[in-house]
Image (cartoon, rainbow, N blue to C red):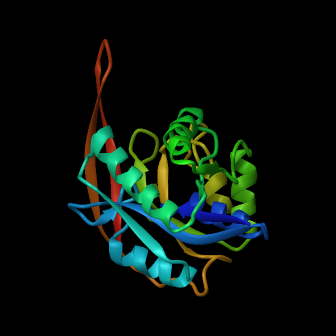
């Protein structure tokens, strides 16, 4: 029997990874782990509040471990928090970590390089599966999710706070991955087969976080647009 913890972002990929892992009778998922910003008390990159994360965990009926990191942490701060969390999991008998990554090879190698010295294995249930097939599986399985963050380099504000359905996927620009795997958008999952009940919510304030990208010959101004969910 594999004793595992799943890294939970609050969005569709981690929800689908959980769904796929739960199908395997040899896997026991004993905890979910979420990285939160210590200053804003929100899920890193997604911007989902700690309160809404707690509601997700309650409906998943899986113990939640919160991994706190500083605002805009450097590699050392993040890795220190990650190592401390993984050591805690290992003491609890966890031998495998589950991630919802799809095709970012460098990220997978990074995760595996950190976990290997700790004796922890990594499992990627969605790995290298075509994004369009994953989205079809996600929707046909009854999951419900909305965009909680978009990259303005790829999408305008009309895409923020939208529920993902067949029309959403069909209307995406050609340069946007259907799963947003390149950071084009992030999601908040509020319903589906991994939850006991759907989570009621409302949309609140929109917040823009600018981002400057410096290249050798120019400076590009872009950013991320978030919507508060409560």
207 vs 114, nearest the viewer: 114
Residue 230: image location, x then y, percent: 35, 78
On the question of residue 118 being in view, the answer is yes
Residue 8 in the image: above or below residue 178: below
Residue 162 in the image: above or below residue 151: below
On the question of residue 230 being in view, the answer is no
- Specify whether 129 is left or right of 149: right
Q: Residue at x 31, y 13 (%)?
A: 216
In the displayed orientation, state which residue is furthest to the top. Answer: 217
Q: Residue at x 71, y 42 (%)?
A: 128
Residue 227: image location, x then y, percent: 35, 64
Residue 201 in the image: above or below residue 181: below
166 vs 26, nearest the viewer: 26
Which quarter of the rendered picture does the N terminus lie within? bottom right
Residue 62: image location, x then y, percent: 55, 78
11 vs 118, nearest the viewer: 118
Residue 96 in the image: above or below residue 64: above
- Specify whether 201 is left or right of 20: left
Residue 59: image location, x then y, percent: 54, 83
Q: Give residue 149's quadrant in the image.
A: bottom left
């Amino acid at each position: 029997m594999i004793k595992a913890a799943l890294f939970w972002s609050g969005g569709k990929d981690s929800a689908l990874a959980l769904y796929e892992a739960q199908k395997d009778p040899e896997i026991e998922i004993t905890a979910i782990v979420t990285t939160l910003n210590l200053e804003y008390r929100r899920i890193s990159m997604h911007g989902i509040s700690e309160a809404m994360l707690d509601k997700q965990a309650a409906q998943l009926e899986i113990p939640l471990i919160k991994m706190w990191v500083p605002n805009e942490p450097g590699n050392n701060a993040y890795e220190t928090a990650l190592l401390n969390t993984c050591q805690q999991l290992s003491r609890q008998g966890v031998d495998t970590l589950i991630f919802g990554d799809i095709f970012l090879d460098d990220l997978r190698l990074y995760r595996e390089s950190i976990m290997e010295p700790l004796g922890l294995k990594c499992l990627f249930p969605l790995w290298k599966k075509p994004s369009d097939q994953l989205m079809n599986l996600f929707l046909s399985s009854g999951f419900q999710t909305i965009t909680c963050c978009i990259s303005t380099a790829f999408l305008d504000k009309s895409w923020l706070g939208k529920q993902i359905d067949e029309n959403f996927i069909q209307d995406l620009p050609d340069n946007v991955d259907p799963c947003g795997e390149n950071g084009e958008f992030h999601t908040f999952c509020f319903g589906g087969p991994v939850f006991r009940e759907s989570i009621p919510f409302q949309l609140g304030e929109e917040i823009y976080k600018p981002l400057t990208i410096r290249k050798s010959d120019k400076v590009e101004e872009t950013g991320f647009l978030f919507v508060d969910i409560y």
